[in-house]
Amino acid sequence: MLIIKNTLDYLNIYQAQLENKKIGFVPTMGFLHEGHLSLVKESVKNNQITIVSIFINPTQFVKGEDFATYPKNTEHDLKLLEANNVDIVFIPEAEDLYPPDHKSLIKIEINQNFTNKLCGKHRRGHFGGVALIVMKLFSIIQADNAYFGLKDYQQYVLIKNLSLDFFPRTKIHALPTIRESSGLAMSSRNTYLNDKEKKLASLIYATLLKFTEIIKISKTINQEELIKAFEALLLKESTAFELQYLEIYDDTLNKIKKYKKNQTFIGTAVYLNNVRLIDNLIF
Ligand code: AMP
């Protein structure tokens, strides 16, 4: 497994060895878990070369978020990647991707139709930062296939569109959310939770599931009523919960009034003692 720490080194290796190979790419922020590894395994299975990037991207963190304390254990990550037959790990420094003396004239502004919902609405500027880093990484890596988790559904929709606009050669693949046996969606940020909180956090998924059943039966979608009921159910379990949003769309994130089988999206962000957790389902 090759560890590459800057763009120029990667480009040299690309020209010398990779240009004619089928490349699969899995971008991550590290502190890897089974969710990340499911993407890695899919890439290894379907490509000649798998490249995983580990980069805690400063531009996608909003003011007041956990950029400075985001969990990190690169040594352990590398062991997991090696054991999963990854070929190249790209671990750039921030100065490599965002050179301090380079004042980019490009600013990425995402359409408000997209950023006025879900995480876009509550993390102003987040998706501009995601788009920026994905455009940088895609331009460098030049992958045939790139793998993303449905856990971050809005991010997946953004990247799918970004790729259609700017990277037609890179096919975007979305993979299901990997969960703990309790149902809790795996996330690097789960490390902020103690055992009791983890148990409580699993209620988010359980409650989402319950709501999919309710919507399937009632067929109509009354957001307001559903939000109230969702919040009440969580708060009944613990006052440590604070609902940030519960939103329902079709699977392209457009508004819907009626349930559409296998094309309905329900997504939520919930604070549990200041730890922000997201989850969603397509049903
Ligand atoms: P992150 O390191 O959080 O930026 O995530 C890197 C990639 O892993 C993204 O495409 C995520 O959607 C994906 N991912 C994170 N958690 C999970 C999970 N529990 N199941 C599947 N994919 C995940």
Image (spheres, rainbow, N blue to C red):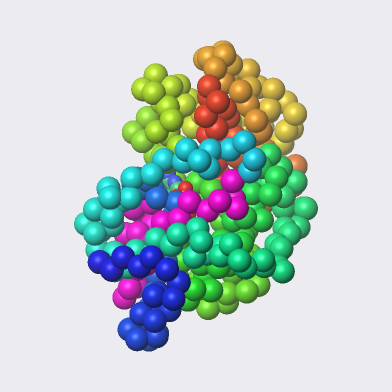
Which of the pair 219/263 is nearer the observer?
Answer: 263
Taking the spot 45% from the left edge, 55% from the top edge, the residue there is 55
The residue located at (36%, 48%) in the rendering is: 32
x, y percentage for residue 21? 36, 82
In the image, residue 24 above or below residue 267: below
Looking at this view, is 182 or 272 the one in front?
A: 272
Q: Residue furthest right?
A: 112
Counting labels gives 0
Q: Is residue 132 above or below residue 116?
A: below
Say whether residue 42 is visible. no
Relative placement, left or right, of 227 versus 271 is: right
- Give the quadrant of the N terminus: bottom left
Magenta residue span: 36-61
> Residue extending furthest front?
101
**x, y percent for residue 104:** 67, 67
Picture quarter containing residue 25?
bottom left
The answer to whether any part of residue 203 appears in the image is yes
State the quadrant of the C terminus.
Answer: top right
Location of residue 11 by image quarter: bottom left
Q: Is residue 23 magenta?
A: no
47 within the magenta span = yes
The residue at 36%/80% (across/down) is: 13
- Residue at point 53% right, 42% down? 67
Q: 145 or 55: which is nearer to us?
A: 55
Q: Residue furthest left?
A: 83
Instruction: Give the side of residue 41 with respect to residue 28, left or right.
Output: left
Relative placement, left or right, of 105 versus 189 is right
Name the quadrant containing residue 210: top right
Q: Estimate the x, y position of residue 107 in percent, counting from the top left.
A: 71, 63
x, y percent for residue 279: 53, 38
